[in-house]
Amino acid sequence: MTFNVLLPLLVVASSFVTGLLIFFLPEHKAHTRSALNMAGATLKLVLVLIMCWGVYRGEMYEFRFSIVLGFDFVLKVDLLSLLLVTLSSVLWFFTTIYAIGYLEGSPNRSRFFGFFSLCVTASVGVAMAGNLITFFIFYEFLTLSTYPLVVHRGTEESLQAGRKYLWYTMAGGAVLFVGVVWLHVLVGALDFQETGFLRAWPASLHGSFTVIFFLLIIGLGVKAALFPLHGWLPVAMVAPAPVSALLHAVAVVKAGAFGIVRVVYDVFGVEFASDLGLLTPLTIATSFTIVYGSVRALTQDDLKRRLAFSTVSQVSYIALGVSVLGLTSSIGGLVHLVHQGLMKITLFFCAGIYAESLSVKTVSGMKGIGRRMPITTAAFTIAAFGMIGVPPVAGFASKWHLGLGALESGQPWVIGILLTSTLLNAGYFLPILYAAWFQEQEKEWGHAHHAPCRYETPMLLLFPAVVTALLSLLTGMFAGAGWSPLALARAIALREYVP
Amino acid sequence: MTMFLAYAVTGMIVFAIGLYGVVIARHLLRKIIALNIMAGGVFLFLISIAARNSQAFPDPVPQAMLLTGVVVALSATAFAIALARRIYTVTGSATLSDGER
Amino acid sequence: MSRFHWSMHVVCATAATFLAAVLIYTVMTLPSEPAGLARLVEDFMNVSGVEHPVTAVLLNFRGYDTWLELGVLLVAVLGMLLFQRQNDLRQIVRMPAAEPVLDWLIRLIAPMMALVSGYLLWMGKYSSGGAFQAGVVLGAACVLLWLSGHPSLESLSGRVFRFLLTVGFSVFMIAGALFMLSKQPFLTYPVATAGHWILLIETAATFSIAVTVAALIMGLQPTYSETEDQP
Amino acid sequence: MDTIFPWIILLPLTGAIATFLVPRAWVIRTGMVTALLTSCMVFAAAYFLHQNGPVHYAVGSWAAPLGIRLYLDGLACVMLLLTAVSGIFISVYACEYFKDKTSGVLKREGIMFWPLWLFLWGAMNALYVSGDLFNMYVLLELLGLSAVGLVALAGTRTVLIAGMRYLIAAMLGSMSYLLGVAFLYAMHSALDTRMMGALIEPGMGAAIAFALMTIGLLLKTALFPLHFWLPPAHAGSSAPVSAILSALVVKGSFYLLLRLWFDVFHNVVTIPVGQFLGALGALAVLWGSIQAIRQQRLKMLVAYSTVAQLGYLFAVFPVTAGAPPTDGVLGQWVIESGKGTLYHALAHAFSKASIFLAAGIMVHALGTDQLSRMRGMAERLPLTTFAMALAGVSLMGLPPSGGFIGKWLMMHAVLGSGQWWWAVVIMTGSLLTAGYMFMMLRQAFQPCEDPSLFKPVPKTMEWAALILAFISIGIGIRAADVLDLLMIGSPFLIEPIAAVGGAL
């Protein structure tokens, strides 16, 4: 087992093993648990950095293991999987720190952190899956590991949310399963290839390919929160802040979007998909979701529900970028995968801090919060600007490429969609900022859930929020650099189009 | 040949009657007796197969099957009666309470 | 006869008649002159160690079935013992001592029945007879003794009773397994002494069948458990 | 191989006799020794089978038409392994389960449990290797009687009535099976499955015999319309017994149906019959799952889930009936669906046994198996809840588990052979299974109000349930070996099998 074969397995195993160890850790051993958590996170980060360096130098990492004849478990690292793996491990590192701070003293944390690590294992596995079957295995494993996180508090409300979440994801998983099996029956091996592998098959199969495409997209759309299938996302907000941060920025939603990217690029191939006329309905669906998500976000008073609806619309940017035929729009879609993750996680961190320190949960309660908690609100503002697409922050780069790509591919109405959604983003973010900075404080601040500390909130909570805010700022400013996610996205997109 | 037909046909009729009895009877003892009638029907058919054609002696294999079948039916019936007895002792009624077959 | 609605009767009756009709029709279509295995049994009779073909089939050619059938009998008794307090017959309700005439008659008949059962066992080799018939006759003798209040069965201790129950099944198995040591398949008897082995197995089977039959009949009587009601 | 072969049957039966004869103190030891020895024999047999292929074994060295021929191939071996592996853990569990909580002495139930359980195990092993129609009848009866004996072990009112109903259903099933065998013998004067398969031609007699035998076996497998006796029997009896019944006993008669379908009646079977059985299976899946969701008690829920999961196994018949024997392409889907069914049976056996053992632990700790009383089990009994969760994952057929491979292979075959409507049934079934499994787990995850309710539970019981759950997940990881073992002697090939003749 050379190192090239072992590395992907090690990356997946690092959080899986820590998860299992934490499961069997007794409740009161907080320090060992945090140590284990941090060790797992750093180990994964280091391994991923090694992998990035390896892939940059052209190494091939692949782990293949045949479960049944014609049914292989493959972990392969290509540029596209690199994008999500780096994002997951970086953000998991910060979310672990945040979670340790956030859950100080709350009951059954061993169970929480166990499932927390399993969930990241699943999201890393989704990223590194080499064929559609392994992707499906980790996709379903993700559902299993996130359900206990959603119902972690055990209150009646969280159980209802868990039930709804379960029904959506289970139904989605079943539809996806049918699609994968049917494709496997028709085509046999389902290994991802750069420009898709379905073009070579005879025209007689194109009919069933279309049906399979829609089955796959519906199955993935549940987790990517496309319009009719997004119902579980706002309801799942009842989970603790690190969970909603992890679920909505890194794990669940990204798995769905990443799945759509894989299906369109590496299974069908984007040119073949547009020849079959599959992309236009996808564009329409994603555009509608973008506008719908933003409109619904306008009216939400609860801060986390507003952020949830904003995620519904933001994730569809990625799917939109993918479904618009054209190099620049794919670059825009791919890079938004990273940018949205950074910005959204900052927003959720700040929302968690507000809830934890001032028990402020609603937007109306945020008047004058800027004076009370300047640093957190500064981070919140940077991320909010990024979401709207204001230039220095990361969001601008992806929206710029999306707009350019739409023009190039001759679908000007997509520009209209982008404009309206930007206005709507401004519509639901700017009032929050205005209220936070410029309005007087009306309500008394609630009591803090943690011991008094030097800054406005414990360092364990503040540090991750600030760092992710800076990260999104830096990725925005240095987008052009050789190392930035934008460069990586451009390299991926170049490979996806048939030369 | 007609001797075989006579026995075989009666065997089938007895089997059907036994089946009817098992479904209809509510009292456990009647059910067990009906089961035995049904078994009797099968065994009658089995034995009628043995002597169909005029050889030196009837085919011993169905007879052996019959003997084994009778003993198996005997032990099953004995166990059923013991169980029925036990149900009567515990529940005080010799019928399956919710009355299905 | 039962509280079912009359329509249930009609439905079941028609279903039963339809089933009978279908079965009778198939019986009609059965071949009238099948080969049957009679000739095949005849060819192997000389090697089977017994003269009577049914005993040969029962104990030699298809001995495996008969062995398992003894197992079924044993399981039935096990099931019956489930509902007893102890694993033996000791506290079966002792019948009142019979009047002198019945007592004298049973004292005369019981040994006769034992003799008849021995004869039936021996005859099994030559004509219809064998372990099961002999066992049942012996069992009947035990039941008669028990009915007449004779103390003989009470002396049967738990261990001996259980041993006797299993002796038929175990002897059959041991005899069968013995020849596996000399690389023969299970239940293969050497041709020369096949008859003797079969006789040995039959005697063991007779004892265990007799005790089983007696136990089943006595076990089903309303014993102490009438009074105390288990939950 | 010939020396090992009969010991698979002899060992459990000798153990049964031994546990019946030895004094009370020795019962558990003899029982466990027999269980371990039998499993070693089964593993050895599997190893030899892997080395030198299927084995024909003439009992009493009499050739097929007259004597009884035993036959061990991949299919039989997988079923033997299934029984052996679940059997060991159920036996370990039973050692603790029947001990009196205070005095630690073996309860009377425990003494009678061992002989009946080992008889049942011996009958199962003999049934899987039997190649003779009448021999199968005797074994079915032995299996049925010892199973009813085990059901009636608990002695409560519900259990006795359920046992009675089970006994009547079993006897009805055996009688109709015997009549079918009698018809076959009347027509072809042979009792060996392979010979019968060669001799039989489609006709009225063969059809009636097939119908009678199938109905008899359906009654014993408790397929949908004939399932009335299963839920009360499986739910009422004590935990190890319900694990034995649900995981092992129902599979015995299903295995026979499979054997008859492939070996004996392969050219009598028509497409409508296959579709009919498939439809019954589909109804069982839907009816069982809906009933399971409505249950208030855990063991009833799991018992109805057995009725539902059995429905999946019947998806193999419509696919096989559709495939004419010699057609290569469709034949490939037949083998695929056979593998899927077997794998589902394997995964179901382990996960169902694990859930029933976990339910037993819950009754042991809480005194009741009411679903509403399960609150806080995740905190107080972490191992048991983890076992339930893993087994639930396997039952639902979610990826890392054996159930998933089974579902994958079945879906693959069903979609491949063009009968897509069974795929819809399998999908709805697995969603409904997810429904009642998560309903159960949701109760366990709720915070516990009163920890004093939970009495301490012996660790071996929890570990037995957990290991069984791990196995049901584990066989999902490395499925290729199990499937290679299964395909030795190609059990699912339906080309007409040459008459075995007296050559053996």
Image (cartoon, coloured by chain):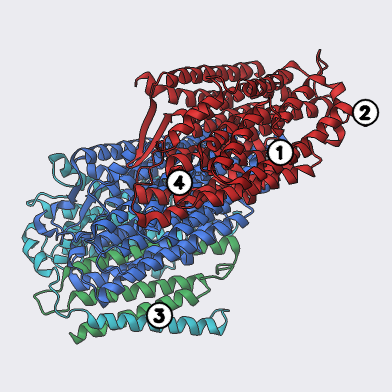
Pair 1/4: label in front = 1
The residue under the point 19% across, 52% down is C200
Q: Are marks 1 and 2 in contact (CB under 8 Å)?
A: no
Where residue C80 sits: x, y (%)? Answer: 44, 56
Q: What is the display colour for chain D?
A: blue
Q: Nearer the viewer, mark 2 or mark 4?
A: 2
Report, in whole angstroms, how far the alpha carbon at label 2 lies from the one at label 4: 77 Å
- The correct choice, above or below, for A208 with respect to A51 in the image is below
Drawing shade for chain B: green
Determine if residue A337 is in view.
yes
Q: Is residue D336 left or right of residue A136?
A: left
Q: Amino acid at mark 4?
A: Phe
Q: Nearer the viewer, residue C125 or B71?
A: B71
Q: Secondary structure at mark 2?
A: loop
Asked if badge 2 and badge 3 are on a common chain, one would say: no
First in sequence, mark 1 or 2: give its number. 1
Q: Which chain is red?
A: A
Give the color of chain C as drawn.
Answer: cyan
Image quadrant in which the N terminus of chain D is located: top left
Kindly identify which chain the residue marked by label 4 belongs to. Answer: D
**Which residue is label 2 attached to?**
A440
Q: Which residue is mark 4?
A: D113
Q: Position of residue D450 (x, y in %)?
A: 73, 36
Residues at marks 1 and 4 on the same chain: no
